[in-house]
């Protein structure tokens, strides 16, 4: 019997074996009933039989073997893709998802070979069946991975949002203790709480921004007419107060008026300067230069120190990326490796450009911002 006919006529025994195997995938399957365990298995098998019954050229076979099978018309998802989404939401792992397909492949072929005996099974059917299962598995894995990624980003977003309230309560309480003048020890402890709270707030801000970008929402900016000289000078004054041991220079030239999100550009500059202080030579200044021309303003942050390796420089704006010799800050706190990624996203939200250069003499990050976004200017 041809394999497509065997699957169609023997659907129930095949589904029973699928269900029995799915029930063994614990703990996700522990409380699932038969419909959930069999989820989309019958539709997947119908798609396989349809594939087996469709004539296929050598070229089509080659394209499918490389993952370029034709997509269905007027179908947003295949049965394999929908199955993957539901398995991900039910708590299955990607290894368990793949195991379902391995078990399905083995049970179908074993049942079919036994049914064909003593005659030999059709070799072309076996090849075509394996191709169809591989295609379904590839579709499932891709959708499963996308669902897991989305769930992770949603979790990070919720975490970053919900931790703000208790953190604000800690900061307010610390500020109250500091204002009591209850002795040097209490004031010192309160100051440490305030500083640690500010660091936690910055980490949460980075986490929230990272989640937004990974959910496709991008960095939120609110453009307004600002003087970049004043905005950036305020940020550098704050950084100098926090790091009095470091020298930070600011050089301004040209017109610095434009339409930008001032707070976001302070965040951008703060991340670049902190990065320069962390990785640059501690006995040399961090230099910030702001230059305005007719249409753009350019911000350059430069530090002396060891050159960044070419491989690291090529992915310096990737999220969760830190140099091989990354350091903690002065209080031993580790960063999330999101600072430069968020800088690049802020630049992107302002329709600007950023580049990094590094040699044995110095490392420089250069940001070019259009003076006014056209949409913001019209508003």
Image (cartoon, grey):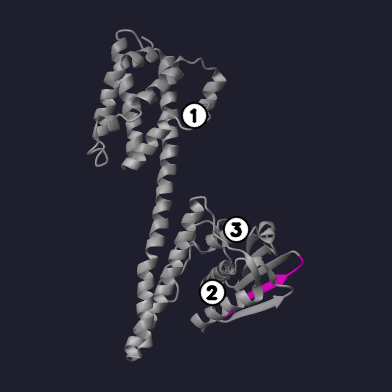
Q: Position of residue 120 (x, y in %)?
A: 35, 10
Evaluate if marks 3 and 1 touch, with contact meaning CB atoms under 8 Å apart: no
Q: Which residues are magenta?
A: 283-294
Taking the view exactly as shown, the residue that stands out farthest to the top is: 119
Q: In the picture shown, does residue 338 fall above or below 111?
A: below
Mark nearer the N terminus (3 vs 1): 1
Residue name at image x 35 percent, y 36 percent: 97
Q: In the picture shown, does residue 229 fall above or below 9?
A: below
Residue 206 is at least partly visible in this image: yes
Residue name at image x 61 percent, y 78 percent: 233
Q: Quadrant of the C terminus?
A: bottom right
**Residue that badge 3 annotates:** 349
Q: Residues within 10 Å of mark 1 (few under 14, many from 20)?
A: few
Residue name at image x 74 percent, y 64 percent: 295
Q: Is residue 116 left or right of residue 324?
A: left
Q: Position of residue 311 (x, y in %)?
A: 56, 56
């Amino acid at each position: 019997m041809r394999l497509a006919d065997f699957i169609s006529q023997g659907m129930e025994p095949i589904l029973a074996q699928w269900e029995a195997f799915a029930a063994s995938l614990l703990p996700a399957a522990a409380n699932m009933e038969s419909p959930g365990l069999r989820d989309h298995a019958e539709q997947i098998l119908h798609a396989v039989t349809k594939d087996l019954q469709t004539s296929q050229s050598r070229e089509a076979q080659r394209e499918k073997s490389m993952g370029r099978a034709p997509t269905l018309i007027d179908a947003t998802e295949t049965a394999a893709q929908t199955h993957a989404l539901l398995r991900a939401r039910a708590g299955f792992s990607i290894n368990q998802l793949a195991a379902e397909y391995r078990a399905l492949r083995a049970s179908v072929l074993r049942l079919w070979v036994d049914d064909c005996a003593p005659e030999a099974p059709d070799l072309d059917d076996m090849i075509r069946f394996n191709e169809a299962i591989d295609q379904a598995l590839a579709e499932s894995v891709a959708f499963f991975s996308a669902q897991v990624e989305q769930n992770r980003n949603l979790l990070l977003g919720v975490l970053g949002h919900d931790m703000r309230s208790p953190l604000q309560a800690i900061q307010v309480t610390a500020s109250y203790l500091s204002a009591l003048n209850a002795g040097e020890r209490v004031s010192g402890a309160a100051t440490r709480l305030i500083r640690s709270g500010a660091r936690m707030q910055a980490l949460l801000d980075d986490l929230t921004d990272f989640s937004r970008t990974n959910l496709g929402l991008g960095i939120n900016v609110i453009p307004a007419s600002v003087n970049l000289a004043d905005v950036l000078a305020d940020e550098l004054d704050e950084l100098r107060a926090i790091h009095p041991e470091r020298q930070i220079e600011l050089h301004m030239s040209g017109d610095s008026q434009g339409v930008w999100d001032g707070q976001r550009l302070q965040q951008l500059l703060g991340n670049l300067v902190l990065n320069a202080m962390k990785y640059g030579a501690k006995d040399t200044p961090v230099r910030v230069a702001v230059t305005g021309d007719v249409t753009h303003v350019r911000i350059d942050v430069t530090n002396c120190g060891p050159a960044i390796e070419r491989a690291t420089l090529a992915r310096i704006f990737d999220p969760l990326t830190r140099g091989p010799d990354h350091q903690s800050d002065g209080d031993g706190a580790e960063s999330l490796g999101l600072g430069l990624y968020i800088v690049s996203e802020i630049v992107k939200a302002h329709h600007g450009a950023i580049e990094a250069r590094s040699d044995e003499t110095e490392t420089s990050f250069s940001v070019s911002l259009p003076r006014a976004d056209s949409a913001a200017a019209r508003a």
